[in-house]
Image: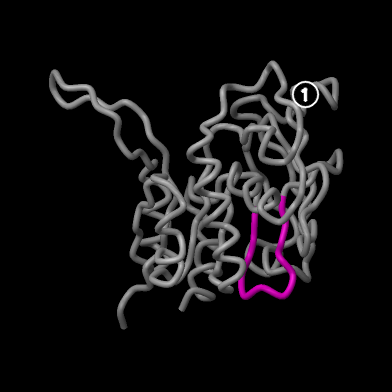
Amino acid sequence: MSRPLIGITAYFEAARWGDWVREAVVSPPSYAKAVIRAGGAPVVLPPLGPHAVDDYVRGLRGIVLAGGVELGADTYNGEQDEHVAEPQSHRDRFELAVARAAVQADVPILAISRGMHVLNVAQGGTLIPWLPEVLDSDRHAVPGAVHTIQVSVTSKLGKAVGDRVEVSAPHHQSVRRLGTGLLAVAWAEDQIVEGVELQGHRFGVGVQWHPERGDDNRLFDAFMEAAR
């Protein structure tokens, strides 16, 4: 049986080859490795513009919306917080178009960290642009800090990973208002949303943490089952 093609969103960064420095399409290999372990064939998607989005969605069996820098506040009609890094507008536009097309076509989506925010905004939701300011604490942004996530056992996410999961997932943004059709299915102890699902979709799951890191590949396995 052939492996289903799975698209993974990427970004542009300067890269060096010997004495040459050029802009390159960059994707951490952990995403591709997790897709391969689950039985898929990864394809990296350069954020070159929305013109090829429909073709991507028709040719792929699943989409991984990968992590990265925070979304620009203009994508959800918010105000850019001074703490937030300069947004990568070209990537924002591309990934929002990919998310909307995949939702429309019922193509399985696994949205990770920033990707969960992309999925939420694509569905008309909004974000908390700088979470430490709202909570008066940076506990969600401490690198390496582990916290417990409570997961709805009736959700696709809960069926894949169980009702509780220990994660290390530093982040500065979070879901404020859920987008159309999205349901919160995982929460931190302070009730910050850590997982969402798109109702009525074959597989539309977003998580705040990074399941591609480490040895637990259960969420990718569930995503790949839907992609087949």
Location of the N terminus by quadrant is: bottom left
Along the line of sight, which residue is nearer the eye, 80 or 111?
Answer: 80
The amino acid sitting under disc 1 is Pro
Compared to residue 213, the image places residue 16 above or below, namely above
Q: Residue at x 81, y 42 (%)?
A: 176
Residue lying at the far bottom of the rendered structure:
1
Q: Is residue 117 magenta?
A: no
Compared to residue 45, the image places residue 145 above or below, namely above
- Residue 9: x percent and y percent? 45, 49
Q: Residue at x 69, y 16 (%)?
A: 82
Magenta residue span: 195-206
Q: Residue at x 67, y 63 (%)?
A: 157
Q: Residue at x 51, y 75 (%)?
A: 225
Residue lying at the far front of the rendered structure:
51
Relative horizontal placement of residue 15, taking residue 224 as reference (left or right) = left
- Residue 226: x percent and y percent? 54, 75
Compared to residue 143, the image places residue 222 above or below, namely below
- Label 1 sits on residue: 132
Classify mark 1: residues with Cα within 10 Å, few (<14), some (14-19) or many (20+): some
- Residue 134: x percent and y percent? 84, 26
Residue 223 position by quadrant: bottom right
Label 1: element kind: helix
Residue 11 position by quadrant: top left
